[in-house]
Image (tube, coloured by chain):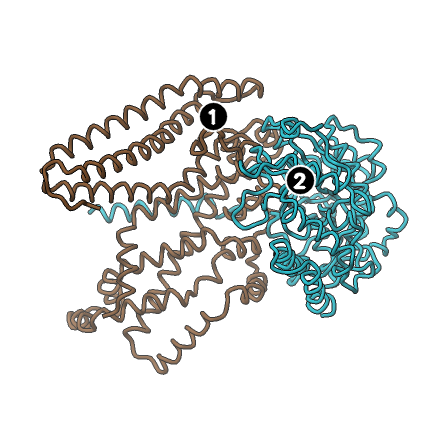
Chain colours: A cyan, B brown
């Protein structure tokens, strides 16, 4: 009986699988030290450096051990939300900058002022620090920061007979852009991603804020914001130097850039190594300046300490050690990342010129909008911006309608 | 399209044949060229072995690939010419009155081949990307945009995923847990969770469906309606309460937690009941007259007759658990990396802004294997079950 044989073979295979997989317990060290659970989302390389720094901290604090627990970045929010509901949360966690506000307003994380954070606060870069500033208090310590700057394809500049450099102002940008654009063979000076975060450099260089400083009012319909979006729309419609990469189905800025279709794109330092592997000749420059000079957005992560943790003070102590100037310099030199500690700015020696540009750009970063649900903010603003860019709505109408929705759905509720 | 004339040498028919032949040549040359290049690329990647010194790696493989260009292009040309000769020979040998049928068939086959290419292209892209070094994933070959096979193949992505690259081995020697924290562990964990869940769900659902379909039960219809009504509530709503229950039972971080809350499958009961309704009661009565017990009726009559639909349910449940990211993420205890399952493990390759496309693709290559195997073995039942469930007599 063939079928019987297959059946028996299947059962044997299954039992073997159970035998191999069921018992996955790992021996955990029990040497009497108190454990601080740290949920992070670092990658393999970052995790190695983290473990080195933890070892050094444990030498200074012999009664404690930090247990780094890696969770996927995609999904760290639901994981934390559910774990906190049943009291399974860690002592501290590294979270996306936009998640700090929700955790703070839901009363899950500790106000850092209770550990006298103001004493050391000034050592951090302002823009990343402000992402953890909610309702007058600080709740998150920045541990990693990024921003976007302007990447440009030197080859395409030379072919157009131009000196390869990013223009200093948006007016010059448009002039240069016209020379770089050759739409008949799909070549454009610029390509952008139309989401709020990616467009913050435009708004910030015009000095426009999305949310007021006290977090209570949406200022997206201000004259400055309108001027910024009008300039963006003119890149697409009037001067036709933008490729329409934000339209559904278009070639993305990253792909168009590495294939020599787009001469300039906004991009962060995370793609530097990848782009170098493509052997293309590219440079990085500061984002062109508007009325408020050059500016950019802020990305990255903050670390929060949870209120329920019995060792919140020690967790905070570890975090200040982890982000002090010396350890930041060590972290950033090994991983080629931007420091968040101003003290580390002098200690880090990058071989990569591009990273120095990013460090300079980072100093001019604007403040990100801090709201309870950043996802909802994007969901409201993005379609309105798209309507304005594609000419379905006037810029002022689009931003006014977005501002009203943000005010009623997000800020007043 | 077939032309109106019925002469022995209709120029319209010959013209159509020429057009179809030209289409065939281009399809065959592009597709077979890519397939042969892919084969050459795989051989190169394995032959180059360990690119220990990074400087030697890409240059070496690129050089090998360059030398293989005439080989795979030549093979593609030979294959195309052979196919053309065959097509011409068949056309000439076909009797004049059957030639329009021949042309229709030829057109049909070509259209089907194009369909196959469209369907399989994403898989082919996945395979090719998994051999590309970091940074090369998005680069398009300017000379030939159809050419997606990498010219500098590397096995690094596969090695990194399986943690057999140099850096991981060095790290693993210090930490025994690191050694097991690889894709293989995730894969086996997922296989266990998905098979156990699929088996138990089909078992419970078929027993439940049998009762709802064939047995007398007070308020049977009402209970069934109530059960169906629960399908209207999105599964996300249950997530937090279910998680709470799992934690209270002390199953957090165990394999039980992965599938226990999903064992009661209303969808499964519904699907099987609809099918079992079509089994005539007289068959059950005949078995009972022969002295079969309740269990025997279920095992000997119901299960074999409903086997296609049971297998369908097995496959659907297996697929669901194989790719169930959110629930497995929530109940995984990340302090124990050995309990991580595949969908969650795949997510670990993505960062805040970056995603290592090469790594994700090589991991995906492994992850589709069980589904492909299951479907190949069971596709006959699968399709049968789907259509039988759809038509109720």
> In the rendered structure, the residue with mark 2 lies on which chain?
A
At horizontal 40% and vertical 40% (from top left) the residue drawn is: B121
Badge 2: residue crowd in 10 Å (few <14, some 14–19, many ≥20): many
> Mark 1 falls on what kind of element?
loop
Compared with residue B26, is residue A27 higher up or lower down, i.e. above or below? below
From what the image shows, is residue A328 above or below residue B1?
above
Q: Which quadrant is home to the C terminus of chain A?
A: bottom right
Q: Is residue A257 left or right of residue A344?
A: left
Residue occupied by mark 1:
B151
Of all residues shown, which one is farthest toward the right? A119
Residue A43 placement (x, y as % from top left)? 63, 39
Which disc is residue A267 wearing? 2
Report whether residue A51 is seen: no
Q: Tell me if residue B141 comes above or below residue B216 in the rendering.
A: above
Residue B185: x %, y % from top left: 50, 41
Front residue of B256/B316: it is B316
Camera-side residue of B75 and A349: B75
Residue drawn at x 30%, y 54% is B382
Q: Is residue B71 above or below residue A260?
A: above
Q: Residue A101, percent across and down? A: 74, 58
Side (left or right) of A370 relative to B174: right
Q: Is residue B137 something one can see in this rendering?
A: yes
Numbered disc in front, either 2 or 1: 2
Number of dots carrying numbers: 2
The residues bearing labels 2 and 1 have C-alpha atoms spaced at a distance of: 27 Å
Q: Position of residue A40 (x, y in %)?
A: 67, 46
């Amino acid at each position: 009986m063939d079928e019987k044989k297959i059946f028996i073979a299947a059962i044997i295979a299954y039992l073997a699988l159970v035998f191999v997989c069921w018992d996955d317990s790992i021996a955990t060290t029990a040497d009497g030290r108190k454990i601080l659970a740290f949920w992070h989302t670092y990658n393999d390389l970052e995790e190695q450096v983290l473990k080195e720094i933890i070892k050094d901290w444990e030498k200074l604090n012999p009664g404690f051990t930090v247990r780094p627990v890696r969770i996927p970045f995609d999904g760290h929010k639901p994981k934390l939300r559910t774990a906190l509901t049943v009291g399974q949360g860690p002592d501290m966690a590294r979270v996306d900058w936009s998640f700090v506000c929700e955790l703070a307003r839901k009363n899950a994380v500790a106000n850092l002022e209770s550990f006298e954070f103001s004493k050391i606060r000034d050592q951090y870069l302002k823009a990343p620090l402000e992402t953890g500033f909610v309702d007058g208090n600080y709740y998150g310590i920045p541990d990693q920061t990024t921003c976007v700057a302007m990447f440009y394809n030197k080859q395409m500049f030379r072919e157009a007979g131009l000196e390869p450099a990013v223009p200093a102002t948006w007016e010059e940008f448009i002039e240069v852009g016209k020379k770089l654009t050759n739409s008949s063979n799909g070549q454009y000076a610029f390509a952008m991603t139309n989401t709020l975060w990616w467009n913050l450099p435009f708004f910030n260089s015009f000095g426009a804020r999305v949310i007021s400083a006290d977090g209570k009012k949406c200022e997206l319909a201000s004259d400055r914001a309108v001027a910024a979006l009008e300039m963006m729309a003119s890149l697409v419609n009037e001067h036709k130097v933008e490729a329409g990469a934000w339209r559904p189905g278009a070639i993305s800025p990253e792909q168009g850039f590495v294939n020599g279709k787009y001469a300039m794109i906004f991009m962060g330092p995370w793609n530097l190594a990848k782009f170098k592997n493509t052997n293309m000749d590219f440079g990085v420059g500061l984002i062109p300046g508007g009325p408020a000079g050059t500016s950019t957005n802020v990305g990255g992560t903050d670390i929060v300490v949870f209120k329920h943790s019995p060792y919140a003070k020690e967790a905070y102590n570890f975090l200040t050690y982890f982000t002090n100037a010396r350890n930041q310099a060590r972290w950033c030199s090994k991983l080629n990342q931007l420091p968040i500690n101003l003290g580390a700015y002098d200690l880090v020696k990058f071989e990569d010129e591009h990273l120095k540009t990013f460090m300079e750009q980072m100093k001019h970063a604007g403040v990100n909008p801090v709201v309870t649900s950043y996802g909802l903010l994007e969901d409201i603003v993005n379609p309105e911006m798209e309507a304005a860019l594609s000419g379905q709505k006037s810029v002022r109408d689009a931003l006014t309608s977005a501002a009203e929705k943000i005010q009623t759905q997000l800020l007043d509720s | 399209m077939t032309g109106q004339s019925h002469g022995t040498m209709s120029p319209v028919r010959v013209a159509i044949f020429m057009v179809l032949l030209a289409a065939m040549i281009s399809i065959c040359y592009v597709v077979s060229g890519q397939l042969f290049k892919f084969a050459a690329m795989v051989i190169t990647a394995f032959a180059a072995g360990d690119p220990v010194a990074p400087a030697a790696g890409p240059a070496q493989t690129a050089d090998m690939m360059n030398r293989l260009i005439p080989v795979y292009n030549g093979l593609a040309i030979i294959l195309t010419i052979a196919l053309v000769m065959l097509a011409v020979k068949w056309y000439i040998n076909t009797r004049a009155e059957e030639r329009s049928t021949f042309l229709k068939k030829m057109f049909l086959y070509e259209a089907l081949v194009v369909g196959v290419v469209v369907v399989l292209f994403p898989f082919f892209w996945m395979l090719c990307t998994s051999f590309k070094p970091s940074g090369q994933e998005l680069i398009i070959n300017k000379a030939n945009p159809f050419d997606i096979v990498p010219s500098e193949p590397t096995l690094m992505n596969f090695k990194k995923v399986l943690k057999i690259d140099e850096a991981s081995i060095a790290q693993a020697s210090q930490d025994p847990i690191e050694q097991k924290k690889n894709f293989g562990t995730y894969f086996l964990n997922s296989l266990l969770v998905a098979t156990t869940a699929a088996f138990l769900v089909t078992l419970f659902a078929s027993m439940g469906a049998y009762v709802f379909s064939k047995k007398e039960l007070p308020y049977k219809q009402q209970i069934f309606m109530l059960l169906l009504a629960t399908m209207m509530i999105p599964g996300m709503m249950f997530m937090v309460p279910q998680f709470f229950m799992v934690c209270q039972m002390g199953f957090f971080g165990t394999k039980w937690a992965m599938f226990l809350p999903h064992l009661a499958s209303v969808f499964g009961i519904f699907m099987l009941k609809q099918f079992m309704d079509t089994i005539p009661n007289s068959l059950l009565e005949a078995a009972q007259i022969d002295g079969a017990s309740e269990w025997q009726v279920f095992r000997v009559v119901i299960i074999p007759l409903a086997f296609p639909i049971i297998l369908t349910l097995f496959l659907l449940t297996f697929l669901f658990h194989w790719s169930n990211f959110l629930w497995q993420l929530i109940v995984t205890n990340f302090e124990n990396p050995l309990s991580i399952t595949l969908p969650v493990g795949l997510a670990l390759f993505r960062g805040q802004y970056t995603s290592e496309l090469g790594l994700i693709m090589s991991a995906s290559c492994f992850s589709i294997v069980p589904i492909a195997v299951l479907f190949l073995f069971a596709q006959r039942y699968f399709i049968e079950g789907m259509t039988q469930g759809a038509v109720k007599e």
